[in-house]
Amino acid sequence: MQTESDAARRHWAIPWLAAGLLALAIPAPAALNESVLRVPVAKGAEQAYIDVTVFRPEGRGPFPIVVLSHGSPRSEAERRAEGRLRLVAQSEPFLALGFAVLVPTRRGYGDSGGSWAEGFGSCANPDYYGAGLETARDMRAAVAAVRGKPWADTHRVVLAGQSAGGFGSVAASATPFDGLVGVINFAGGRGSLAPGQVCGEARLVEAMARYGRTAHVPELWIYSANDRYFGPSLARRMFAAFVAGGAAAEFVEAPPSGVDGHGYFARAMDDWSARVAPFLARIGARP
């Protein structure tokens, strides 16, 4: 099984619009309203339980939901090393806008149960399409776990993620569920082997094309200009393939960030939050 790992120029796909690093070890502020759910994820007869970190704004709600999804380090040891994923700093811009945030630690990562479900096979014949749908399975389970809770407005759900989490968010939009209103893809992709090396780029582009044929919610794709996992040329090829089937998306090439722009999601909250807030308002997701 192959293992793996994350000035703007805008390209509008429709007239009115738009596997990498995990989390930084940032302690939660004292006032953060945090809880943890143990959520079942079923695949056929198999069932595993994953940790879902929940952050809620002050007040009773109901709050619209953002599912914030992590990337995928290249090795199994790294995937298990972080424990329960929290993405505290990246959650805070969404909390400030009035969203509740769900951070699922997917199967095979951290302290969650189950084996790693997102493998794509060999480099010679990578199944990125199927791998993305497995990532999406865990996101769907996280949303299902909060349906009916008085604080959760599951009629307004946004999927947002970085690297493998961004790719899985796009995959989830291909089989949309009740309440999904938008997707934010930060540097989404799979198959990074080393800086500038991706297994079967054409298969990655093909998977995005397949997702785009059945995706029907607005999407915002953000890639840093110096991303060394999925660089600007590949990012734009994936985007072009995705919108070719009629999907509604906006592409943003964000400024360079550090030595490797794949860390933009973790380092540049001020920059991306200024882009995300108007998008959320346009699609009617904000409170």
Image: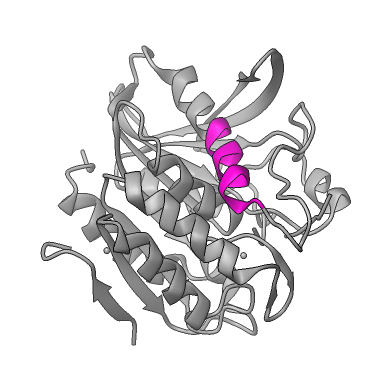
In the image, is 227 to the left or to the right of 153? right
Q: Residue at x 38, y 48 (%)?
A: 94
Q: Position of residue 6 (x, y in %)?
A: 62, 65
Residue range (magenta): 127-138
Is 136 magenta? The answer is yes
Residue 271 to residue 100: above or below: below
Q: Residue at x 36, y 53 (%)?
A: 212
Who is closer to the viewer here, 56 or 257? Answer: 257
| Residue projecting furthest to the left | 15
| Residue projecting furthest to the right | 77
Is 177 magenta? The answer is no
| Residue projecting furthest to the bottom | 7
Colouring convention used in this rendered image of the protein: one colour
Residue 190 to residue 176: above or below: below
In the image, is 5 to the left or to the right of 181? right
Residue 197 to residue 59: above or below: below
Q: Quadrant of residue 163?
A: bottom right
Q: Residue at x 74, y 57 (%)?
A: 73
Main SS of the magenta part reads helix
* Quadrant containing the C terminus in the rendered view: top left
Who is closer to the viewer here, 14 or 106? Answer: 14
Does the rendering let one see residue 256? Answer: yes
Q: Position of residue 123 (x, y in %)?
A: 76, 62
In the image, is 38 to the left or to the right of 68? right
Q: Position of residue 90 (x, y in %)?
A: 50, 54
Residue 154 to residue 223: above or below: above
Does the rendering let one see residue 28? Answer: no
